[in-house]
Amino acid sequence: EKTIKPIVAGNWKMNGARASLATLAEIGKGVSASLASRVDVMICPPATLAYTAAVASVGMPLAIGAQDCHVAASGAHTGDISAEMLADCGARAVIVGHSERRADHGESDALVRAKAEAAHRAGLVAIVCVGETEAQRRAGEEIGVVADQLEGSVPDGVTADNTIIAYEPVWAIGTGLTPTAQDVAAMHKAMRDVLVARFGAQGAAMRLLYGGSVKPGNAAELMAVAHVDGALVGGASLKADDFLGILAAY
Ligand code: PEP
């Protein structure tokens, strides 16, 4: 039996305007107290909505997170947003190293690690994303690739309280494709072993999320896999019914 409280986090990506706060409210209404006792719920809207979403979420059984941060606390970085600014808005967590940022912005493991450190400096939970490409999986390299990403992207000294890992195979994001439950089990066991070897009891207690085309129809099977402690959800977090349908796995 699993002893780690799971978390299901929605990543709205570059979607959502002020009107989307209605979706947030619908999600909040759909999460009963008993559901909230079994699973933590988070929505990561675009940074433009972080503050209004955090204000709107007061009294709702969900937390607000962000999708990226700069490594510095402040300074001459036009257009960037620091972890401290996100914390000031009421965000509790920030996603770092999402594959879209690794691809679109050339983010390296070292940069992702520095961003996770910035998140911790600001008192935020870092949700560190890792995952192999389709070519890497076809070559049978997925376990090694993800182990290397964990080694490079997760800072030293992290705890189960300040860090969450999200395994998101790049080929499964937004495609409707998912690995089999057996493949997810193999990856999550491998990640657990890496994290326990490096962080001991903190690695054993750290939440390991699966992400990539999680939908109401596949959530129960994926969330039941050993060492899967929740989900990071993209497309299906944009509609309250879909997101609540995923939460129904708990
Ligand atoms: C994501 O990008 O974090 C994600 C899991 O996307 P989707 O659910 O749309 O595949």
Image: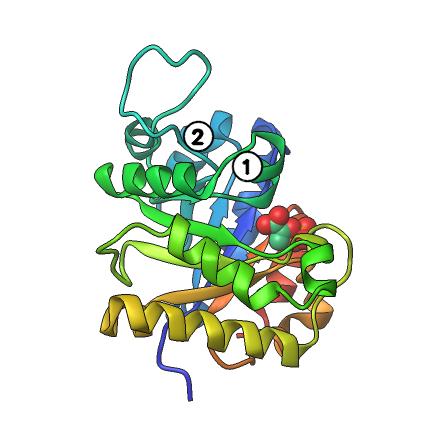
Neighbours of disc 1 within 10 Å: few (<14), some (14-19), many (20+): some
Q: Residue furthest bottom?
A: 1
Compared with residue 67, is residue 145 higher up or lower down, i.e. above or below?
Answer: below
- Residue 82 spot, x, y in % from top left: 34, 26
Q: Gap between marks 2 and 1, in whole Å? A: 8 Å
Q: Identify the residue shown where x is 48% and y is 38%.
A: 108
Compared with residue 69, is residue 174 higher up or lower down, i.e. above or below?
Answer: below
Q: Looking at the image, can residue 249 be seen?
A: no
Q: Looking at the image, can residue 167 be seen?
A: yes
- Residue 150 spot, x, y in % from top left: 42, 57
- Residue 235 spot, x, y in % from top left: 68, 49
Where disc 2 sits, the SS reads helix
Q: Earlier in the sequence, mark 2 or mark 1?
A: 1
- Residue 36 spot, x, y in % from top left: 41, 66
Where disc 1 sits, the SS reads helix
Q: Residue furthest right?
A: 176
Q: Identify the residue shown where x is 49% and y is 47%.
A: 43
According to the picture, the residue beneath numbered tag 2 turns out to be: 52
Tell me which amino acid carries mark 2: Thr
Along the viewing direction, whichever of 144 and 125 lies nearer the viewer: 144
Query: Which circle marks residue 106 in the picture?
Result: none
Within the image, what quadrant is residue 139 found in? bottom right
Compared with residue 141, is residue 130 higher up or lower down, i.e. above or below?
Answer: above
According to the picture, the residue beneath numbered tag 1 turns out to be: 21
Q: Identify the residue shown where x is 54% and y is 44%.
A: 98
Within the image, what quadrant is residue 176 found in? bottom right
The reply to whether dot 2 and dot 1 touch (C-beta < 8 Å) is: yes
Question: How many numbered dots are placed on residues in this image?
Answer: 2
Q: Identify the residue shown where x is 28% and y is 41%.
A: 117
Along the viewing direction, whichever of 92 and 183 lies nearer the viewer: 183
Neighbours of disc 2 within 10 Å: few (<14), some (14-19), many (20+): some
